[in-house]
Amino acid sequence: MKAITAFSPKDEAIVDDRFKKIVDATPLGTSLNASIKLTSYSPDDMKYESSSPANAVAVFSEIYYDKGWKMYIDGKEQPYFRADYILRAAVLPVGNHKVEFIFHPASYYTGEKISMAGSILLVLALGGLVFMEVKKKPEADKKAA
């Protein structure tokens, strides 16, 4: 917390030690010509276009949440990390790239599949009961006659 009080967020980012490997894996440069632009926004899918003459760290004005979010650079999944205590950040490679954050929680989609399987089993069970009742009815009518 002390580090947050004495830094310039425009020029530097504070990264937790847990994410040091991600940042240290790539040599970073600085450039006034680097840019990043939000091109499409929905709550579960954000698309950016980035351009940089050197590898750089981008700090996004979004809350870091690692459960369910995936980041893709040019369609290939890449790691992202927490910076400045609460924000999402990523190392962006040199050049022009499309960056996309997609919220796709595995637990939700697993639950959705389980729910679908349960619904199908319920419909089959109810259909089986109806079939058995319909089958019993003609036999009861024959015995009554």
Image (spheres, grey):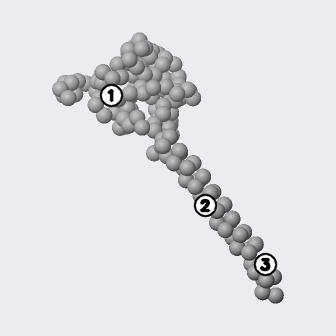
Which residue: 55% across, 50% down?
114
Tell which circle, 1 or 3, labels the residue nearer the N-terminal end. 1
What amino acid type should be assigned to the residue bearing mark 3?
A: Pro
Tag 3, which secondary structure? helix
**Which residue bears the numbered disc 1?**
83
What amino acid type should be assigned to the residue bearing mark 1?
A: Ala
Q: Nearer the viewer, residue 81 or 30?
A: 81
Q: Residues within 10 Å of mark 1 (few under 14, many from 20)?
A: many
**Which residue bears the numbered disc 2?**
122
Contact between marks 1 and 3 (CB within 8 A): the answer is no
Which residue: 45% across, 26% down?
79
What is the x, y in percent for residue 17? 30, 21
Q: How far apart, in angstroms, are the residues tagged by discs 2 and 1?
A: 48 Å
Contact between marks 2 and 1 (CB within 8 A): the answer is no
Q: Is residue 105 shown above or below 87?
A: below
**Which residue bears the numbered disc 3?**
138
What is the x, y in percent for residue 1? 20, 29
Q: Nearer the viewer, mark 1 or mark 3?
A: 3
Tag 1, which secondary structure? strand
